[in-house]
Image (tube, grey):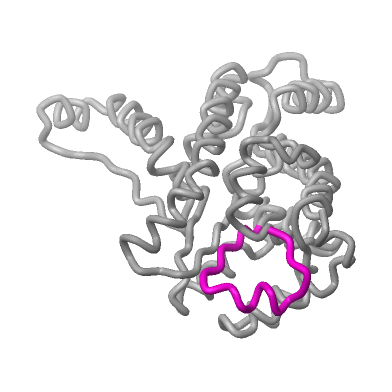
Amino acid sequence: MLFASADEFRSLPRKAVTVFGMAGVGKTRLGNIVRRADWFHFSVDFRIGTRHMGEYIVDNFKREAMKVPFLAELLRSDSISIQSNISFNNLDPLSSYLGTPGNPAKGGLPFVEYQRRQEQHRVAEIYALLDVPYFIERAKTLYGYDDFLCDTGGSLIEVLDPHNPEDPVVKALADNTVLLYLRGTETDAQRLIDRFKANPKPMYYPPDFLVAKWDEFKRLNGVVHDDDVDPDAFGVWGFEALLRDRLPRYQALADNFGYQVDAPDLSDVRDEKDFMELMCRAIANRPAMAASR
């Protein structure tokens, strides 16, 4: 969805926007703001962690519980139940399942198991993004919401081709929503890296990138065996490497199919009116020729 003018967007009777960018840049905060103004807030990570990976997550909890004889007996007799309390603002159940590869004594996963869970996440994320058109209509017909905001994960860019209009995920999003890139600055990037150290989020690496960075990390740190890798150290190092790798692809997606705003501008958004002004500025600032593509 590209527009000849901001007024064209403003006059839409029903609005649907997909926000994307680095993990932690402010996408969920925007969703929480517009939700107060009767927008339907669709969290891709929440959809992944419930509909598409919920059983994997809960089974992992049960697997750990079965290691405790007292809990194992209660589980076998259906005397207790275990569930995930994942929410839009708490993705820890998904993070704990995805984990980080490395030394098991430090909470790391075997690298092959980590790769298996990564593939599960890739498939789940694609399905969750392809759910967007259905949820736009579901939000209207079931709940009466006219307006819709899709809050994507940072790994959105890993499951689509930002240059291909026929890519299934690109097509599902661009045909049904306005794509808005929340572009972070170098300062934002460092802030997100610092935040990641304190509170890791679900991470997805493209398979070839993961293998290359895993081998590079071991080489740089003189580690021979996978089980000797410090999972926390790799998690932070890998996050920074992945973040830098994604930035030009985020930009390509915005250039080809959407709009962009600088992340610092989000600090001025306090309500739906501010968000609409932000959207209209983004549309007005896009080169006029882009609207004719």
* Magenta stretch encompasses residue 281: no
Q: Is residue 112 above or below residue 118?
A: above
Q: Residue at x 57, y 68 (%)?
A: 29
Q: Quadrant of the N terminus?
A: bottom right
Q: Residue at x 59, y 70 (%)?
A: 30
The one nearer the camera, 202 or 278, is: 278
Residue 126 screen position, x and y as percent: 56, 36
Location of residue 112 (image quadrant): top right
Residue 14 screen position, x and y as percent: 52, 69
Q: Is residue 126 above or below residue 22?
A: above
Q: Is residue 81 left or right of residue 132?
A: left
Residue 273 screen position, x and y as percent: 60, 85
The one nearer the camera, 75 or 12, is: 12
Residues in magenta, as a range: 1-19
The one nearer the camera, 14 or 265, is: 14
Residue 19 screen position, x and y as percent: 64, 59
Location of residue 234 (image quadrant): top right
* Magenta stretch encompasses residue 3: yes
The one nearer the camera, 253 or 7, is: 7
Q: Residue at x 83, y 48 (%)?
A: 252
Q: Is residue 1 left or right of residue 84?
A: right
